[in-house]
Amino acid sequence: MGDKEFAFVKEAFESNWIAPVGPHVDMFEKEFCEITGARYAAAVSSGSAAIHLALILLGIQPGDEVICSTLTFAASANPIVYQGATPVFTDSEPRTWNMDCNCLEDAIRDRIRKGKLPKAILIVHLYGQSADIDPIMNLCNQYDIPLIEDAAESLGAYYKGRHTGTFGKFGIFSFNGNKIITCSSGGMLVSNEEGLIKKAKFLATQARDPAPHYQHSHIGYNYRLSNVLAGIGRGQLRVLAERVEARRANFDFYEKELGCLPGIQFMPEAAFGRSNRWLTCLTIDPSRCGSTREDVRLALESENIESRPVWKPLHMQPVFQNYPYYGSGVAEELFDKGLCLPSGSNLSKEDLQRVVKAFLRVYQTNLIQNKN
Ligand SMILES: *Cc1c(COP(=O)(O)O)cnc(C)c1O
C-alpha cells in the first residue's frame, strides 16, 4: 500500500458509503480513464467479472467460438466457458511471448473453413508486455471480429505510446492481490463506447430495470466493485508509476547479474512498447546450462525462495485440452523452460541479491557436475 489508500478508505467509512456504489467508485473510474486514456470504464469485482461482462456484451452464446491466447492464466478463458462457448487457443510468438498473429490467421481461416466465424478474439498482454496489436487489429478488421484485450497484468504498460487495454472493443484490468496495483480484489472494464459501459454497469448491478419496484427483463450479475475497495484503488493509482519503476528495476538487476549466463534468456521487451515488467521471467536451456528449470526452481525453494514456472498453456490443461489449438509449440517450450523470479515491488536490494546468489549456486554446481 502507498500513503493515500487508508485516507480514502477512512473517507468511505466516515461517509458510510459501504456498498458496491458510491463516490470512490465513480472517482476511481474517472481517474483510471485519465491514467490509461480509456474513454469509459466500469469498476467491477474482479478481472474475471470484467472478461465475463465483455463476452456477454458481445453476445457470446453457447456454440460460439472465441479465439484466446494459450499462454495465460486460466481466468482468461474461464468466462468463455461460462457462456457455453468454445475457446480456440492460439500459440505465442518467441519475440513477445504473446499471441502470434500468424497462428491467429491460421485459426481464423480454419474455423471459417470448418463452418464458423469466431465471435471474438481475446488477446493477453502477458507478464506486463503488450502483444503486437497492429497486425492483430488488422486481422480483426479484415474479418470483422471484435477484440478483447486481457490487460490484467499490463496496467502501466504501453504499445506505441498508447496504454494497453485501450485498443480493442473492450479492455479488462485486474486489481487482484498479486497484480501490480491492487484493491485486494477488483477489476475494470473499459471501452471507447459509452453505451457498452452503461450496459455493463446495468448488468453488473443485477440488471434492475428503471422502476420503483424490483423489475427485471435481463439476467444480471452482482459484479460491481465495493466503494471501500475503490478507495484503496484510488490510492493505488497514485503509486502506479512507482510500482512500474520498482518492477522494472527488479528486472534490470536480475538481468545484469544473470543475463550473461549461458542458456539463460530473459523475456525480451519488444521495441514497439514499454512493459511494466510485472514479473521478471526467463528461460533456462538445459542443453546449455546443465540445469533444468525445475532444478533451479527446487534449489531456490530449498532456500525458501519462491519462484514459479511460466503459465502452463491452456491447451495443455486437463480442463481445456479437448478444445482446438493452433500453434507450433512455442508456448509449450516457454512453459518447459520458463521461470518467474520473485518480483514484488517491495523487494529490497538484499532480497534481490539473495535470489541471485542462490540462482548462481545451483547454476555453477550443475554446470560443474555436467562437465565431469
Ligand atoms: C489475474 C488475471 C486475470 C483475472 O483477474 P482476477 O481479478 O483475478 O479475476 C485474468 N487474466 C489474467 C492474464 C490474469 O493474470
Image (tube, rainbow, N blue to C red):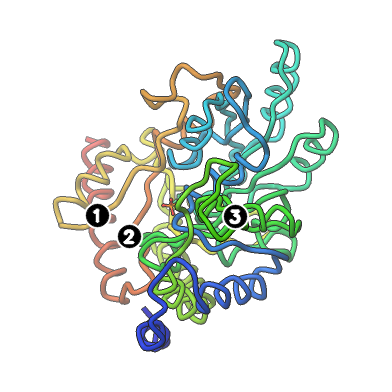
Q: Secondary structure at mark 1?
A: loop
Nearer to us in this view, 254 or 102: 102
- Label 2 to label 1: alpha-carbon separation: 7 Å
Quadrant for the C terminus, please. top left
Q: Are marks 2 and 1 in contact (CB under 8 Å)?
A: yes
- The amino acid type found where label 1 is placed reads Glu
Eyeballing the image, is 24 above or below 109?
below
Residue wearing tag 1: 306
Q: Mark number for residue 202?
A: 3
Which residue is outermost to the top? Answer: 114
The percent position of residue 316, horizontal first and vertical second, equals 42, 25
Q: What secondary structure is found at the residue carrying circle 3?
A: helix
Q: CA distance from mark 3 to mark 2?
A: 39 Å
**Does the beta carbon at disc 3 come under 8 Å from ligand 1?**
no
Q: Is residue 351 left or right of residue 193?
A: left
- State the residue in front, 271 or 217: 217
Q: Residue at x 28, y 43 (%)?
A: 367
Q: Nearer the viewer, mark 3 or mark 2?
A: 3
* Residue displayed at 70% across by 10% down: 114
Q: Which residue is mark 2?
A: 342
State which tag comes first along the sequence, 3 or 1.
Answer: 3
Give the Cα distance between marks 3 and 1: 41 Å
Identity, as a three-letter code, of the amino acid under mark 3 = Phe
Query: Residue 238: percent from the left, percent from the top?
Result: 51, 81
Q: Is residue 76 above or below residue 28?
A: above
Q: Would you say residue 272 is visible in this rendering?
A: no
